Amino acid sequence: MPTAESLTIREPDDWHLHLRDDDMLALTADFSARQFARAIIMPNLVPPVTTIAGAEAYRERILRVLPAGRSFTPLMTAYLTDQIDAEEVGSGHERGVFTACKLYPAGATTNSDAGVTDIRNIQPVLERMQAIGMPLLVHGEVTSPDIDIFDREAVFLEQVLAPTLRDFPELKVVLEHITTEDSVQFVQEAGTNLAATITPHHLRIDRNALFEGGMRPHAYCLPVAKRRHHRTALRRAAVSGSPKFFLGTDSAPHPRHEKESACGCAGIFCAPAALESYALTFDEEGALDKLEGFASEFGPRFYGLPLNDGTVTLQRESYEMPETVTGGGLSVVPFHAGETLTWRAAPRGEL
Ligand code: DOR
Ligand code: ZN
């Protein structure tokens, strides 16, 4: 079979993205905006985004740092807390400000201290979300220190997600950044109201990447990468053509010195070559024809949003990913740093 030299697909969206604020926002936002028409923006700022006014102000700050002429739609999310006001969240969705709500179990990951301590504390919000068709985006890990870190996602399915789906059978739920075969199977077997996102890095690394010749903080994210057979299951799901699995990069930049420290933070900055990284994986799987559905169709269909009209073209081309991305006094190490990539996406839109 001849190998394709270029691939044109409908413009994609990123259904899970951290853009941060201030200098980090200014440094990182256009890496995503030049590849994706829309992105679901994570609300785990300090303090988190919990109000309509907070989300509107953050959306403005995002748009302000983009180059003039770049069209990009940030889709804002509300950070669920034990005290979150169902009315604020519900009316924020009805007014088109909040696309979805994000559930961080308290203590599960970066800036999750204000998260939900027990899912029972947010029942009224879930009722309201189910009634109005507002999606719940889930960081699916239990937080008990007694549960092994490599088991936290699987235990979450059983202890939190299954009962929640039983109690709210119509609630739209996205299980974010899945890392296990258990999650793939759980999502496949659930109703059409449950879908999952898969990151570029979980399709490429397994847990050995964290210890290759020494400790590798830039391969550390949460949920942490698992054994190889889990990666294999994620790859199969991504290229399966099932509309239940779609693109969400979880690009999560941290300053280099905060990753390379005695207590390095979780997060992989994959935005600089996110689409290219997915293309590399789909190419390796002999499934480039499945990239468009995964990147550009299944996400908007699940969210009930229109598909994008434009296209983006990827060319087969070799180039090296820099060791760092710098600006505004910050230095961030990207996913694939120092590696040769084989696909390059043309930037979106005229500038
Ligand atoms: O690795 C991660 N980084 N996982 C998350 O869930 C949060 C993210 C971040 O905000 O840095
Ligand atoms: Zn995330």
Image (tube, grey):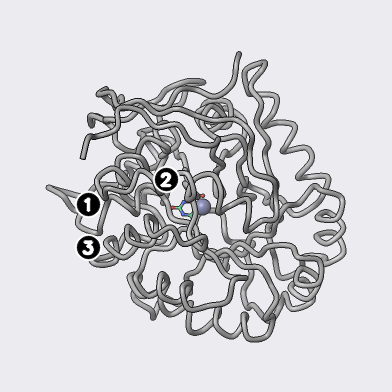
Is 217 drawn above or below residue 2 in the view shown? below
Q: Name the residue under label 3.
A: 228
Kind of residue at badge 3 = Arg
User: How far from the left and from the top, in percent, is residue 137?
Assistant: 61, 62
User: How far from the left and from the top, in percent, is residue 65?
Assistant: 64, 24
Kind of residue at badge 2 = Leu
> How far is mark 3 from mark 1, CA to CA?
10 Å
User: Which is more toward the observer, 287 or 266?
Assistant: 287
Q: Mark 2 points at which residue?
A: 291
Please give the name of the residue rendered at 32% of the width and 48% of the height, measured from the top-left corner: 287
Is 246 drawn above or below residue 2 in the view shown? below
Label at residue 209: 1
Please give the name of the residue rendered at 79% of the width and 47% of the height, measured from the top-left corner: 97
User: How far from the left and from the top, in percent, is residue 285?
Assistant: 26, 50
Assign a secondary structure to mark 3: helix
Nearer the camera: disc 2 or disc 1: 2
User: How far from the left and from the top, in percent, is residue 187?
Assistant: 48, 72
Nearer the camera: disc 2 or disc 3: 2
Kind of residue at badge 1 = Ala
